[in-house]
Amino acid sequence: MRGERQGQSQTGVGEPDGLDRLWTPHRMAYVRGDLAADPGSSPEPTEEPGCPFCRIAAATDPDGDLVVARGSSAFVVLNLYPYNPGHLMVLPYRHVADYTELDEDETREVAELTKQAIRTIRSVSNPHAFNVGINLGAAAGGSLAAHLHQHVVPRWSGDANFMTVTGNTKTLPQLLSDTQELLRSAWSRP
């Protein structure tokens, strides 16, 4: 009783914060650095044919690769698992893991393609805002951390509605192929 009056838990340790806990002990493999549990998070960048971004970079089928635009040292591709319609990624062709490993041309082109991606998405779908960012390393959320990629995610007020929050389901009103065609068509427009 005394612990409850002082705001302590039943065990008498700590202050309650009002949060529920979802215990996920399988995640300890990531915390411990057991990379075998996360094959997509190799700490050393290596040219490997198993990298999906390297496969997309080398692809020649313009309709099957979800590529929106190509530059000389970087390219733009739709995210296969988008948060919202128009969610795309800007990547260097070269297989590098860290932003600091980009050369000057890659850095410049990733930045320019990101700006063009934002302009293009605005022109076709008029989002309210954007999330733009890079997850460097698996611990930062990079599921394919061995190949650097910058996300450009259009956002609309209310896009994380009850379906996402309570149903753990994301609703996407447009097929990836339709999004790709829309963005490709608008890409080079001023």
Image (tube, rainbow, N blue to C red):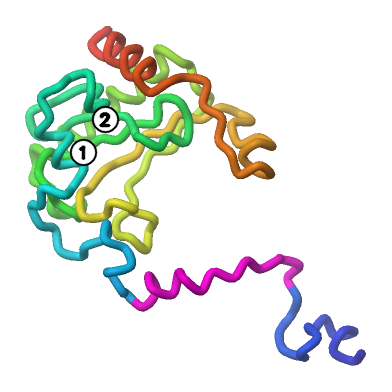
| Disc number for residue 91 | 1
Circle 2: element type:
strand
Provide the residue span drawn in magenta. 17-32
- Residue located at (29% from left, 41% from top): 150
**Residue 86 vertical placement versus 18 (above, below):** above
Quarter of the image with the C terminus in it: top left
User: Where residue 34 sits in the image (x, y, percent)?
Assistant: 31, 74
Rendered image: mark on residue 36: none
87 to the left or right of 60:
right
Q: Amino acid at mark 2?
A: Val
Label 2–label 1 contact, CB within 8 A: yes
Q: Position of residue 131 (x, y in %)?
A: 44, 37
Q: Is residue 45 magenta?
A: no
As rendered, which of 91 and 30 lies closer to the eye? 30
Residue 137 in the image: x percent, y percent?
Answer: 29, 59
Residue at mark 2:
77
What distance separates the C-alpha of mark 2 from that of mark 1? 8 Å
Q: Which structural element holds mark 1?
A: strand
